[in-house]
Amino acid sequence: MAMTQLEVLHVLARHRGQRIVITTMTTAGLWPALSDTPLDFFFIPSAMGHASSLGLGLALAQPDRGVIVVNGDGSLLMNLGTLVTLAQHAVPLTMLIMDNGLYEVTGGQRTVGAGTVDFAALARAAGIPRVYEFERLEQWEAGAADALSGPGPVVIWLKVEGRLGQQTPKPPHPMSEQIARLRRALGVAD
């Protein structure tokens, strides 16, 4: 049986260290129960697929800190070019792809190619140097420390159960407050 998104996030919370964590869509509603620090950014834009671009910018600006982007398969499909762009930069960025084959927050429609898209192969073909795949929780628990350490960029493809009928979550803090919190945590002047 595939793991749940919450199970994946529990493992991530244990291994995230002091890295910035960007969550989007459904995971933005789950992550605050596990972590709500100034280094958490709940990115819920009106256009899916751009959390990885935000993460890349932060990783370039904060190379000593590191960034983890928790992305969905639907979000990545909206911006596949991000893999090629990410591969061009030796940055401390880890992208988790939570693959449930659904566009959850828009009503649970199946993603194009659900069950047939090999996100690990796409990441490797784009030039990502470190790619991991996990289908079961015990695999993820055993491999998370290795996958989340070392040089980046890194792509981690996780098969997760779908959660039909999810609504786009409201972030626990308004976007302006999140930006201010993150800037303070990173020592960037307002």
Image (cartoon, rainbow, N blue to C red):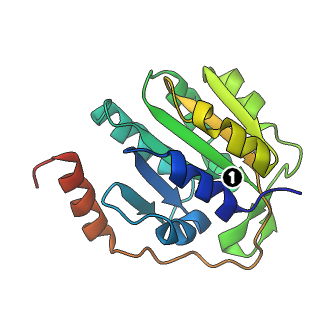
Task: Find residue 29 and report its image quarter.
Answer: bottom right
Q: On the picture, is 56 further left or further right than 164?
A: left
Label 1 element class: strand
Q: Which residue is farthest left? A: 189
At label 1, the amino acid type is: Met
In the image, 17 versus 96, the foreground residue is: 17
Number of marks drawn = 1
In the image, 104 versus 9, the foreground residue is: 9
Q: Residue at x 10, y 50 (%)?
A: 189
Q: Residue at x 53, y 60 (%)?
A: 24
Q: Residue at x 45, y 23 (%)?
A: 89
Q: Is residue 110 above or below residue 55?
A: below
Q: Position of residue 134 (x, y in %)?
A: 76, 41
Would you name the residue on which mark 1 appears? 98
Q: On the picture, is 136 further left or further right than 89?
A: right
Q: Is residue 62 above or below residue 23?
A: above
Q: Residues within 10 Å of mark 1 (few under 14, many from 20)?
A: many
Task: Find residue 65 and report its image quarter.
Answer: top left
Q: Position of residue 98 (x, y in %)?
A: 69, 52
Q: Position of residue 124 (x, y in %)?
A: 70, 23
Residue 50 visible in the snapshot: no
In the image, 104 versus 8, the foreground residue is: 8
Quarter in which the N terminus is drawn:
bottom right
Q: Is residue 55 above or below residue 61?
A: below
Residue 136 visible in the snapshot: yes
Quarter in which the C terminus is drawn:
bottom left
Q: Position of residue 133 (x, y in %)?
A: 75, 36
In the image, 77 versus 70, the foreground residue is: 70
